[in-house]
Amino acid sequence: MRILVKSQVKTKVKTKVKTKVKTKVKTKVKSQVKSQVKSQVKSQVKKLSFDLYSKLSFLFRLVAERINSLD
């Protein structure tokens, strides 16, 4: 078995802690970004679908008026 010097133990602990903190931060940031993007996309889709719906209803109204005016 190898006997570790104080400085070696220090660096080993440092690197282990560093990697653990890094991965924890990475996963937290990832999940936060994911949820933010999800909510933004959801709101954009809602806005676009409402916009599309209003435009289509306007077009259908115009077509209906044209059909009625032909009679």
Image (cartoon, helix red, strand yellow):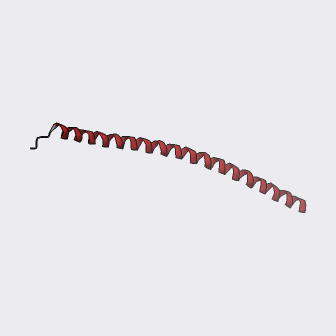
Q: Residue at x 52, y 43 (%)?
A: 36
Asked whether 18 or 62 is in front, the reply is: 18
Asked whether 16 or 43 is in front, the reply is: 16
Q: Residue at x 11, y 41 (%)?
A: 3
**Where's residue 34, x and y in %?**
48, 46
Q: Residue at x 22, y 37 (%)?
A: 10
Query: Does residue 63 appear to the left or right of 4 in the view shown?
Result: right
Q: Give the number of marks.
A: 0
Query: Does residue 35 appear to the left or right of 49 in the view shown?
Result: left
Query: Does residue 41 appear to the left or right of 56 in the view shown?
Result: left
Asked whether 44 or 1 is in front, the reply is: 1
**Where's residue 31, x and y in %?**
45, 43
Eyeballing the image, is 30 above or below 67? above
Quadrant of the frame with the N terminus: top left
Asked whether 17 or 10 is in front, the reply is: 10
**Where's residue 37, x and y in %?**
53, 46
Question: Farthest residue toward the left?
Answer: 1
Query: Does residue 60 appear to the left or right of 25 in the view shown?
Result: right
